[in-house]
Amino acid sequence: MLVTIEGIDGTGKSTLLAALKERLSDLDPVFTREPGATWVGESVRRAIAEQIDPITEATLFVADHAAHLATVVRPALAAGKLVISDRYSDSRFAYQSVTLGSVIPNPEGWLRAMHNGWSIVPDKTILLVIPVDDALARLATKSGHEHFERREILEKVQNRYLEFARAEPDRFVVVDAMLDKDEVARFVADTIRLVVVEGGKRKRK
Ligand code: TYD
């Protein structure tokens, strides 16, 4: 089973992931991430830092995804593992459809088409949602900022995410990231356990 964790910067994804590692340790999941599960992620980091042109950046994110699938996700799924990815394709569909908004006519269609036929759709996607002001306040306390971490961008990115959740209500679980962090962790851990149980039932049928 493949579960992905998504949300704008500042939603507390890192804190949640750390808590899930403890709470779900009995399931022995493979924790992974985009960008950066392979060396391709290093070029992505460089592209982000240098603010290279948006098409280059977007295609590097897709290259990172391809390498991630080939080296981490597919082998783990083939071995029957639960895979939990900190960001995945919806990050591209949300962020790059914003960064490419004034560059190409239909960025989301272009990005989705680039994934068609080879990418794997997650079984469940946890979407952390937070008022953009609160996300910015949380980000203000950390050092080093990516060019995505601006109000105009994050507002649009979160709206895209919410549209995706409305379009695929069975896949997305929207979580209020303003709730107490233990409560968020407990709810998400329970949700992932259900996904695993339901996946097991489907396999037995
Ligand atoms: P991430 O490593 O999750 O952020 P952090 O450095 O805070 O841990 O992701 C880095 C940035 O890249 C983040 O602002 C989201 C963005 N991103 C995209 O724009 N597209 C993508 O496809 C992915 C995976 C991330």
Image (cartoon, helix red, strand yellow):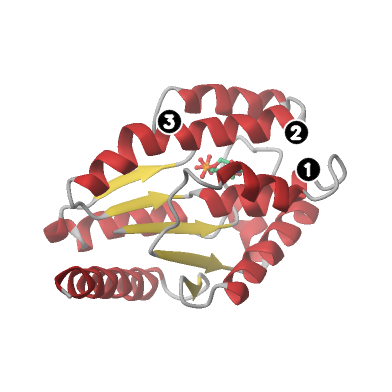
Marks 1/2: CA–CA distance: 6 Å
Residue at 58% over, 56% down? 138
Residue 147: x and y, percent? 71, 38
Mark whose residue sits in front, 3 or 2: 3
* Comes first in the chain, label 3 or label 2: 2
Q: Secondary structure at mark 2?
A: helix
Give amino acid for label 2.
Pro
Q: Which mark is residue 100?
A: 1
> Which quadrant of the figure contains the C terminus?
bottom left
Residue 114 at least partly seen: yes
Q: Which mark is residue 50?
A: none
Residue at 35% over, 70% down? 188
Instruction: Name the side, left or right, on which 181 lies relative to 134.
Output: left
Residue 64: x and y, percent? 50, 32
Residue at 34% over, 76% down? 187
Task: Between residue 109 and residue 155, name the one nearer to us.
Answer: 109
Residue on which the image places disc 2:
54
Give amino acid for label 3.
Ala
Residue on which the image places disc 3:
67
Image: 205 above or below 88 = below
Task: Tell me the crowding category of disc 3: few under 14, some 14 to 19, or many 20 or more residues within 10 angstroms, Cα based.
Answer: some
Task: Between residue 114 and residue 126, name the one nearer to us.
Answer: 114
